[in-house]
Amino acid sequence: MSIRHLILSLWCCLMFSCSKKDSKTTVVPTSPSPSNNTFFVGEVQPAASKSCFAGAYYRKLVSSVDIWGGIGGRVILPTIVFDPSRINPAKPAQFLDNPSIYMGGNMGGQETDIGLTWEVIREENGAVTADRRAFRPFLRRSSHAGSGQAALYENAPAEARYYWYPGEEVWMSVKIVSNGMLRLTVEGGGKKFERDFECGGYTFAGKGEFKRVNAIDQVSNEGKPVQATNTKVVGAEWKVTYIYRMVNGALVEAPFHDGRYTEMKCPSSNYFSIFSTQENRSQGAEKIEIYGRGY
């Protein structure tokens, strides 16, 4: 080989990488973008937009429908300022607005919402509080025709080791761990909750979507227009978000960057203050405030 050809070969090796990677695990760059987005070979791109479901104020990032296996992220929990006029008449110590931060998705026609919601606690003397005082894990699934599963909702036990508070930083993830089984993990502040949750629609070979959501839920209002409120949820900050993909039978972690999700602000954008830099968006990170009165 001539010196010229040797130099050319070395240059090509440096530019296009001499290392060999399995084509199924290669992450390839797209054309240049502000967030330097990268994608798996054959990855399905997310929808340009999605319709809102009525009943709550929520900020949602949702993936494409593909061979995803879960989602995870690190978040600082928000502070809540409740509208004092929105008292729940059935439970006067509580409000008709309730914040939640959760994950989940839809696979095999089964919807899941899994994460943290503002809940009552059990005090050291054994009494359950009339008012809600801490974020506590919850798991919800819709029914699933294929497995015959009925809809189900449950909370983590009302124990101090499963309470998280505004300002605390937690790691949260929802992953497929076997066919028909999701695992919720919440960890932070020296506390950890982990629960395997039967969800027949979620399988390693299936295609589905995963999401993360910050919300002000409203009591008995699902499917209805949002109720006017002065409740405000501030200080939530996602430090990073990952999505997991099935590659060679294992879950591979990848950034949930802004090329991988459909962005939703429901019922409309004026109820949200979202701050993120280009670097933030490349890591699935952002600061979120929700205000029922609007900005």
Image (tube, rainbow, N blue to C red):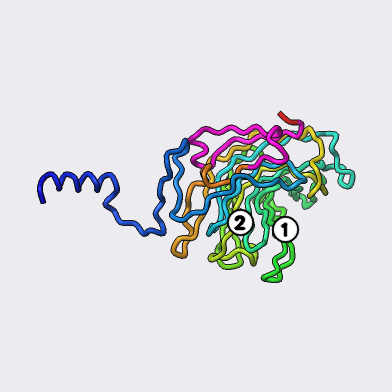
Choose between 74 and 287: the one closer to the eye: 287
Q: What is the number of the mark on residue 154?
A: 1
- Residue named by callout 2: 184
Q: Nearer the viewer, residue 248 or 240?
A: 248
Q: Amino acid at mark 1?
A: Glu
Residue 127: % across, % down: 80, 50
Q: Is residue 190 visible?
A: no
Residue 155 spot, x, y in % from top left: 71, 55
- The quadrant in which residue 286 appears is top right
x and y percentages locating residue 216 in the rendered image: 73, 41
Q: What is the three-letter code of the residue carrying label 2?
A: Leu
Location of the C terminus (image quadrant): top right
Is 186 on the left or on the right of 250, as rendered? right
Alpha carbons under labels 2 and 1: distance apart: 12 Å
Which quadrant holds residue 49?
Answer: top right
In the image, residue 100 above or below residue 250: above
**Residue positioned most to the left:** 2
Q: Is residue 153 above or below residue 188?
A: below
Q: Which of 286 and 161 lies nearest the eye of the viewer?
A: 286
Decide whether residue 286 is among the magenta residues: yes
Q: Is residue 108 left or right of residue 73?
A: right
Asked whether residue 31 is drawn in magenta, I would say no
- Name the residue located 65 percent from the left edge and 49 percent from the top edge: 102
Q: Earlier in the sequence, mark 2 or mark 1?
A: 1
| Residues shaded magenta | 264-293
Q: Residue at x 29, y 53 (%)?
A: 19
